[in-house]
Amino acid sequence: MEKNQISLPVDDLPKKWYNILPDLPEPLPPPKEPDEGPSRLEFLAKTMTKECLSQESSSQRWIAIPEEVRELYIQAGRPRPLYRARRLEKHLKLKKTRLYYKREDLSPTGSHKTNTALAQAYFASREGKRVLITETGAGQWGTALAHAARLAGLECVVFWVRSVYDWKVDRRTLMQLLGAKVYASPSKQTRMGREILARDVNHHGSLGIAVSEGLEYTEEHEGSVYCLGSVLNHVLMHQTIIGLETIKQFELIDDQPDLIVGCLGGGSNFGGISLPFVGEVLKKKRECEFLAAQTMASPSLLKGRYEYDFGDVGEHTPLMKMYTLGHKTEMKPIKADGLRYHAAAPIISLLRHRGIVKATAYPTDERAVFEAAKIFLQCEGWLIAPESSYAVRAGIDEAVKNEKIGQEKAICMNISGHGFLDIPAYKEKILS
Ligand SMILES: *Cc1c(COP(=O)(O)O)cnc(C)c1O
């Protein structure tokens, strides 16, 4: 019997994260101060943990995962399996294309974000912090941080984009069960939130506004630390646990991916699975292509410009060189709200600029991607997150394209999360 599930023994959980910075084809453009206003770099240094700040610009290729964090990873179900999608292959009548998927949907809070949340919570507690503050869009990051804070014995405060807060009631309940304080953003908790609400009480919010609120709140509350769930270098590095496991899993079955596909909002799940492979491609140790699947609501890698921009609407962050649509851009709300961000991580942006990473984007009616999620559920039996359905859509499209070319090819999709808390979105998009 050919096995569809490729599992890694617990003892084979990687002991180090991979930091791609020293291996990039050119130095990553450093963050910069804007011409006006207070120092953003000093501000960031004040709000983050020292460990994450030092990892952000580290030139060390391999960074040891503390034993305590490895234990938390194992507690959260790592290593996660890789699957061969034989049933989907059969449905699509694939002859030349092998489809695989990595199971980040098996996380306790439903997404890959626990990989960095657990690390950040551990570093914060080691540095004597008491409260973790953050923003969340789709709600996955807020839930992951609430979970990590609880396991590390810390408190957690979450600013949640109002347009999503209002309809994802069950995810809100999960965060609250984990003991987090959850505010709809724009909120009355901060000066910025109050200003926006004064102009428009029904403002639906954005990830950028929520970031600004979280940073302002952190600055005003002793013992608190701000945690970011994507975009920054250290976040992508924590996520490399995904790709490092995947490399070992492909070795176990003596196969290798020719194409890796992931959905991309800020770039953390895509970077997490891709970067360990990119590192080997850069060293000419393997050949592999990388495709990021985005939404037309925020197609940063396709329509953005590669230039310095702020990471948030409130301009609290330093300027980072990224593919960006502009930090003040209004983006249409979609169900896969985790993909709605104006820019892509600096590391991914540089790789895009160098032609190593490619991108595609799907329309905001989301019909094509929800259809892919339905096919995936009915073939493979797993309900994935709306965000992950962009990766599956792109994986299916690439497989169909490859069948026409007729070459042997292995495609690996990253399933960034599960869809059990997104049932209302599925009901609206598929059943009605
Ligand atoms: C947050 C999230 C994303 C998008 O964020 P990235 O940093 O681009 O990975 C994608 N899928 C899920 C399930 C998420 O929670």
Image: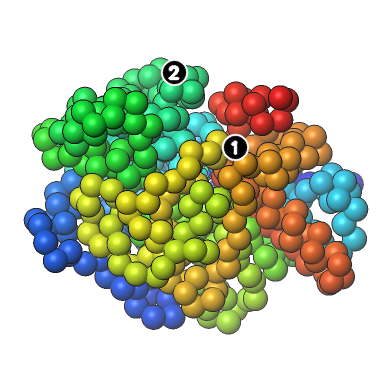
Q: How is the image coloured?
A: rainbow
Q: Nearer the viewer, residue 342 or 353?
A: 342
403 relative to 192 in the view: left or right: right
* Picture layout, residue 368 above or below residue 35: above
302 relative to 237 in the view: left or right: right
| Outermost residue, front side | 199
Instruction: Say which residue appears at 15% left-offset and 33% top-offset.
Output: 191
Circle on res. 385: 1
Q: Amino acid at mark 1?
A: Ala
Q: Amino acid at mark 2?
A: Thr
Coordinates of residue 317 in the picture (x, y in percent): 23, 54
Circle on res. 245: none
Q: Nearer the viewer, residue 127 or 187?
A: 187
On the question of residue 347 being in view, the answer is: no
Q: Residues within 10 Å of mark 1 (few under 14, many from 20)?
A: many
Q: Nearer the viewer, residue 31 or 167?
A: 167
Q: Is label 1 within 8 A of ligand 1 (CB to nearest ligand atom)?
A: yes
Q: Quadrant of residue 186?
A: top left
| Precedes in sequence: disc 1 or disc 2 | 2
Instruction: Say which residue appears at 55% left-offset and 74% top-offset.
Output: 356
Q: Nearer the viewer, residue 243 or 185?
A: 185
352 relative to 130 in the view: left or right: right
Secondary structure at numbered mark 1: loop
* Picture layout, residue 178 above or below residue 24: above
Q: What residue is pinned by disc 2?
A: 173
196 relative to 357 in the view: left or right: left
Coordinates of residue 252 in the picture (x, y in percent): 70, 59
